Amino acid sequence: MATAATYLENLIRVRDSIPVEVSKIAYKKEIEIIDLNREDQLFKNSILPTGLLSNSYKRNYKGFGRGYPKTKDKPFNFFETGAMFSAFRMKTDGFELEIYNNSPTVDAVSALAGGNIIGLTPQNEERLNWKIIYPDLMIFINKYL
């Protein structure tokens, strides 16, 4: 049976480890987190991190594969060749998490879309915190307490 002192030591150890553990969880689920931005927001819903719809296509675009057809007056689906989508990355330091994109076209695409395309909507920030990070963090905490 653990003493109060042992429990307190474990509690302090867990508290001090939480930022590092959150980073570990985030890196373990990096693709899922990045897909909140590129798949859920941009490709499926055509929304910017502000929650607003992106600008729309000015003409019809014919093509084959994912993201086509691109129809006049429909919001951008942000999928052209996939090069920009594959350039999404994430970095984290404790409780700070940043999604970024080094593609040379990302600034031009943001301008066409009507705003920055990189980052999570408030709804996806909630999903990140409560559906992606929280369950694994509770497993970590419960393992030591």
Image (tube, rainbow, N blue to C red):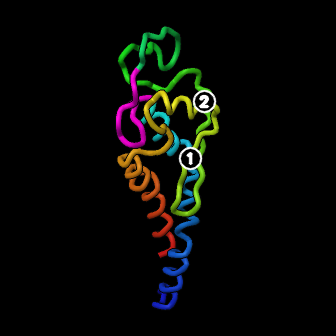
Q: Which residue is mark 2?
A: 105
Specify few, some or many for label 2: CA neighbours under 10 Å numbering under 14, 14-19, or 20 or more: few
Query: Horizontally, is 3 left or right of 74 in the view?
Result: right
Nearest to N terminus: mark 1 or mark 2 = 1
Numbered range of the magenta stretch: 43-56
Q: How far from the left and from the top, in percent, is residue 19?
A: 54, 67
- Would you place residue 75 above or below residue 50 in this image? above
Alpha carbons under labels 1 and 2: distance apart: 22 Å
Q: Label 2: state its secondary structure.
A: loop
Label 1 SS = helix
Q: Position of residue 21 (x, y in %)?
A: 56, 64
Residue under the image location 57 percent in, 59 percent down? 23
The residue closer to the viewer here, 14 or 2, is: 14
Quadrant hosting residue 53: top left
Dot label at residue 87: none
- Assess whether residue 53 is covered by the magenta stretch: yes
The amino acid sitting under disc 2 is: Thr
Measuring 45% from the left and 51% from the top, which residue is drawn there? 132
Label 1: how many Cα within 10 Å (few below 14, some 14–19, many 20+): some
Name the kind of residue labelled 1 in the image: Glu
User: What residue does disc 1 label?
Assistant: 30
Q: Is residue 33 above or below residue 12?
A: above
